[in-house]
Structures are given as structure tokens and as C-alpha cells.
Image (spheres, rainbow, N blue to C red):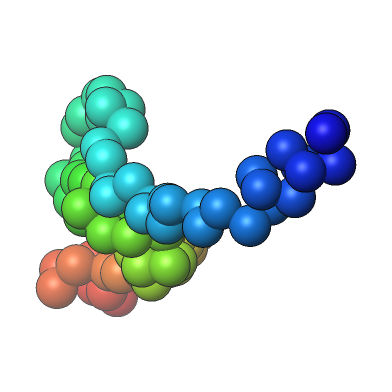
Amino acid sequence: MRAEAGAAAAEAPAEPVEPAGPAALGVVRTPTGHAGVDAHLARLADADHLAADGHVEVYEDVHRGLREALTALDAPPVPGPYENRS
């Protein structure tokens, strides 16, 4: 009898399970005071409305922007128009 019950359960069609839609994580982003960095961090909110496979593009874009901001900090200062006096 157990075999019949197991076979009947195995033959019953399973209801399709639909994946949950995108949901915001609710992560609080504290402003850094640097407008460029804050703009890149605000872009992370775009991922809240995308399916998981769309997150990569947003994360790579933000990462690229943050790397550029950090690289700019290492650049030598550009002399002003009156700093090259001889």
C-alpha cells in the first residue's frame, strides 16, 4: 500500500513555482559628502528594480565609477593659470 501512495504522489503534477519578483533590500546609503561618489552609490538603487541577472551591469558601472573617483585622488594637481611664474 505504501508503494501505491508513493507512486500516486510521484505522478501528481507539481504546481509550477514562479520566482519572486525583484524586491528592494532597503539598504540605507549614507551620503559621503563627495557628489561624484554619492551619485555612483545612488545608482545602486537601480538594481532594486531589476531581476538578479540585471544586477551585474549596475554593479560593474558603479564599481567603474568608484575606481575612477579613487584614481582621480592619486592624480597630480593641475597647476592653475598663475602658478607657472618664473
Residue 10 shown left or right of residue 26 in the figure: right
At horizontal 73% and vertical 38% (from top left) the residue drawn is 5
For the residue pair 70 and 17, the one nearer the viewer reads as 17
Name the spot of residue 43 as percent of width and height, x first: 22, 54
At horizontal 28% and vertical 50% (from top left) the residue drawn is 21
Badge count? 0
For the N terminus, which image quadrant? top right
Name the spot of residue 77 as percent of width and height, x first: 36, 62
For the residue pair 67 and 82, the one nearer the viewer reads as 67
Residue 47 shown left or right of residue 35 in the figure: right
Residue 83 shown left or right of residue 53 in the figure: left
Name which quarter of the figure residue 3 lies in: top right
Residue 42 shown left or right of residue 25 in the figure: left
For the C terminus, which image quadrant? bottom left
Q: Is residue 40 visible?
A: no
Task: Name above or below for residue 73 compared with residue 41.
Answer: below
Name the spot of residue 20 as percent of width and height, x first: 34, 46
Name which quarter of the figure residue 34 lies in: top left
At horizontal 36% and vertical 67% (from top left) the residue drawn is 54
Q: Is residue 20 visible?
A: yes
Task: Name above or below for residue 53 compared with residue 47.
Answer: below
For the residue pair 62 and 6, the one nearer the viewer reads as 6
At horizontal 28% and vertical 69% (from top left) the residue drawn is 79
Name the spot of residue 23 as percent of width and height, x first: 27, 40
